[in-house]
Image: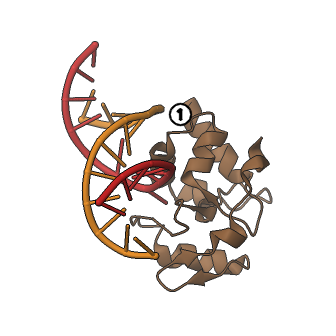
Chain colours: A brown, B red, C orange
Amino acid sequence: MSEFREKVIECIRSIPKGQVASYGQIAAACGHPRAARQVGAVLKSLDITEKWKKGKSRQRVVPWWRVINSAGAISIKGNWTATKELQAELLRGEGIEVAEGYKINMKKYRITTSYYL
DNA sequence: TTTCCGGCTGATT
DNA sequence: GAATCAGCCGGAA
C-alpha cells in the first residue's frame, strides 16, 4: 500500500456529499498536482471491499463516484463493480444531476479548489 | 534500473 | 464546443 494511494483514498473520502471533484483536484490535494492519472489508477484498483465495506456501522466506503474528470464527465473505463451507469445512479442518489452522455454540471457541483487548502 | 501503460490535463487546432 | 497532442507520474513488469 503506497502512501500516495492512502492519501488519495483519504482525500476522496473528504469530498462532501452532493459535490464532485476532478482527478486533478484529488491529485493536487495529495500533493501531486500532475498525478491525476494515478488517482484513476487507484480507483480502478479499489476492489469491492474498499467500495462497499459494509457490515460495520462505520461507513468505510470510498465515494469514488464523486470523482470525475475535469470535463465534468464520467470517465470510468469499466470494472466489474464500477460502471458509468452505476456511478450516474449513485450521483443522482445524492442529488447530483447526470445529464445525457453521463455529463455532470460541474459548474454547480464541482468542489471548490480552496476546499483542500 | 529502465520501460510501458493508463478511469488525466491544459493548450492548441 | 469537439478532437488532437504532448507532457506528467506512480506502479507493475
Can you say whether A55 is above or below B12 in the image? Answer: below
Which of the 4 image quarters holds residue A28? top right
Which of the 4 image quarters holds residue A53? bottom right
Q: Nearer the viewer, residue C6 or A18?
A: C6
Left or right position of A14 against A69: right
Residue A67 position in % (x across, y down): 59, 60
Left or right position of A79 against A48: left
Q: To which residue does mark 1 refer?
A: A1
Q: Which structural element holds mark 1?
A: loop
Q: Residue at coordinates 59% horizontally, 53% vertically from top-left?
A: A50
Total numbered labels: 1
Q: Quadrant of the C terminus of chain A?
A: top right
Residue A97 position in % (x across, y down): 65, 81
Can you say whether A47 is above or below A80 in the image? Answer: above
Left or right position of C7 against A100: left
Q: Chain of mark 1?
A: A
Can you say whether A79 is above or below A44 in the image? Answer: below
Residue A66 position in % (x across, y down): 63, 63
Residue A82 position in % (x across, y down): 48, 67
Dot 1 alpha-carbon crowd within 10 angstroms: few under 14, some 14 to 19, many 20 or more: few
Question: Which amino acid does the dot numbered 1 rest on?
Answer: Met
| Residue placed furthest toward the bottom | A100
Can you say whether A108 is above or below A60 in the image? Answer: below
Q: Residue at coordinates 53% horizontally, 76% vertically from top-left?
A: A103
Which of the 4 image quarters holds residue A19? bottom right
Q: Residue at coordinates 51% horizontally, 47% vertically from top-left?
A: A39
Q: Residue at coordinates 71% horizontally, 72% vertically from top-left?
A: A108
